[in-house]
Image: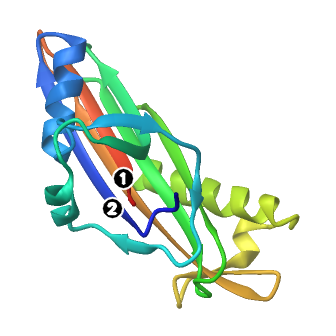
Amino acid sequence: MVAKRIVFKTGFGYHRSKLGSFEMALRDVGIEKQNLVMVSSIFPPGCEFSVDGAEFNALKPGDITYCVMARENTNEPGRIVSASIGVAIPLDNCKYGYLSEVHGFGKTEDAIGNEAEDIAVELLASTLGLEIDLDKSWMERKEQWMIDGKIYKSESFPIAKVGADEQWLTVLSVAVFIL
């Protein structure tokens, strides 16, 4: 079982209960009718990348659906919660990539997204047995990474929202595996 496509989406939900806010966030993403199974973080070789979400239309209610999920919640008014999936993938799609999930408090979308990308790149390099200096490997003009003479792209899917009075807030960033 290897995913042919991974769909990246973010969402959020407010509700009077913590579980209700999670359900609202799942609905916002479009995967509330699936039985979600969290998996670790390898982006399969040859896998396609999507941010459309139209692929969710092929899923049936109750389908076992694999995903990597970054999730955070709060019931504190004014508190910022954020989550992001980061992905690092080689330009050579015969090789695997890496996903990271990051979540926390007080971070903007840019900050949590950059952190998720950096972690994905670091972890991919380490699984390849390589050391990386993030400051020296990033080629800003081309928006790509050079690791051990090979080029990698990275991206993140961040979300940050502010807690409301008398409500729970859940934010989600997900990478949904389409088999």
**Residue 120 location in percent, x, y?**
61, 58
Tell whether label 2 touches label 1 (CB within 8 Å).
yes
Q: Alpha-carbon distance for marks 1 and 2? A: 5 Å
Q: Where is residue 35, by image quadrant?
A: top left
Tell me if residue 11 can be seen: yes
Q: Residue at x 50, y 57 (%)?
A: 86
- Which colour assignment does the render follow? rainbow
Helix, strand or loop under label 1: strand
The type of residue carrying mark 2 is Val
Label 1 vs 2, first from the N-terminus: 2
Residue 83 versus residue 161: which sits nearer the camera?
83
Q: Characterize the local packing of mark 2: few (<14), some (14-19) or many (20 or more) Cα atoms within 10 angstroms.
A: some
User: Mark on residue 176?
Assistant: 1
Q: Which residue is mark 2?
A: 7
Q: Residue at x 54, y 60 (%)?
A: 117
The type of residue carrying mark 1 is Val
Q: In this image, 101 relative to 33: left or right? A: right
> On screen, 82 above or below 18?
below
Q: Residue at x 36, y 53 (%)?
A: 176
> On screen, 73 above or below 47?
above
**Residue 99 location in percent, x, y?**
55, 56
Quadrant housing the C terminus: bottom left
User: Mark on residue 139?
Assistant: none
